[in-house]
């Protein structure tokens, strides 16, 4: 039960990231979330939308894993590990904030899955 709640949190975070990267990148909210200038946001909007799409796939894989119940555990493990790796990589290459926003929730969900809670 706790693992499912934490996975739901990871899904919600990634859905929010999808919206920010695909639709709000050039808005004040999107620029503030990522610390962007209007010029840089305009120059990178296509890259951000592409990145948002990938985050959407991570969320979709986790939704599928949850929807399948115990038959979807492999999907939950796989996509949580993908989120964790992406979060750690982003945390060390782009912003330390990503470690808290993306990697930590995935790590907690993985821990809950491991312990069966």
Image (spheres, rainbow, N blue to C red):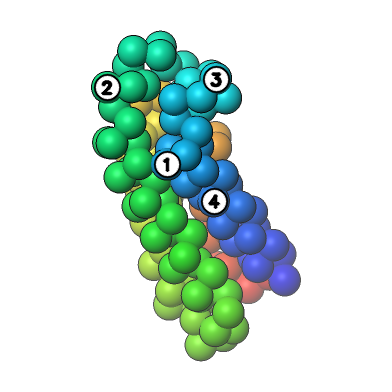
Q: Identify the residue shown where x is 39% and y is 45%.
A: 52
| Quarter that holds the C terminus | bottom right
Q: State how far apart marks 3 and 1 are (Cα).
A: 14 Å
Q: Earlier in the sequence, mark 2 or mark 3?
A: 3
Q: Is residue 9 left or right of residue 50?
A: right
Q: Identify the residue shown where x is 46% and y is 17%.
A: 35
**Crowd band around label 2 with a 10 angstrom C-alpha radius: few (<14), some (14–19), many (20+):** few
Residue 83 in the image: x percent, y percent?
Answer: 42, 52
**Crowd band around label 3 with a 10 angstrom C-alpha radius: few (<14), some (14–19), many (20+):** few
Q: Identify the residue shown where x is 51% and y is 43%.
A: 19
Residue 14 in the image: x percent, y percent?
Answer: 51, 49
Q: Earlier in the sequence, mark 2 or mark 1?
A: 1
Residue 72 seen by the camera: yes
Q: State how far apart marks 2 and 3 are (Cα).
A: 15 Å
Residue 34 in the image: x percent, y percent?
Answer: 46, 23
> Residue 15's mark?
4
Q: Which residue is mark 1?
A: 22
Q: Earlier in the sequence, mark 1 or mark 4?
A: 4
Q: Which residue is mark 3?
A: 28
Residue 99 seen by the camera: no
In what element is the residue under mark 2? helix
Q: Identify the residue shown where x is 50% and y is 33%.
A: 24
In what element is the residue under mark 3? helix
Asked whether the beta carbons under mark 4 and mark 3 sit within 8 Å of each other, the answer is: no
**Front-most of residues 66 and 91:** 66
In what element is the residue under mark 4? helix
Q: State how far apart marks 1 and 4 are (Cα).
A: 10 Å
Q: Which residue is mark 2?
A: 43
**Front-most of residues 116 and 31:** 31
Asked whether the beta carbons under mark 1 and mark 4 sit within 8 Å of each other, the answer is: no
């Amino acid at each position: 039960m706790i693992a499912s709640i934490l996975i739901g949190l990871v899904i919600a975070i990634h859905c929010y990231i999808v919206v920010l990267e695909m639709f709000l990148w050039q808005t004040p909210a999107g620029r503030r979330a990522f610390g962007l200038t209007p010029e840089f946001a305009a120059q990178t909007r296509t890259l951000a939308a592409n990145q948002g799409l990938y985050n959407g796939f991570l969320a979709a894989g986790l939704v599928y894993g949850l929807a399948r119940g115990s038959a979807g555990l492999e999907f939950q493990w796989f996509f949580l590990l993908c989120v964790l790796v992406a979060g750690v990589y982003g945390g060390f290459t782009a912003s330390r904030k990503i470690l808290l926003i993306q990697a930590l929730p995935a790590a907690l969900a993985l821990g809950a899955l491991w312990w069966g809670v």
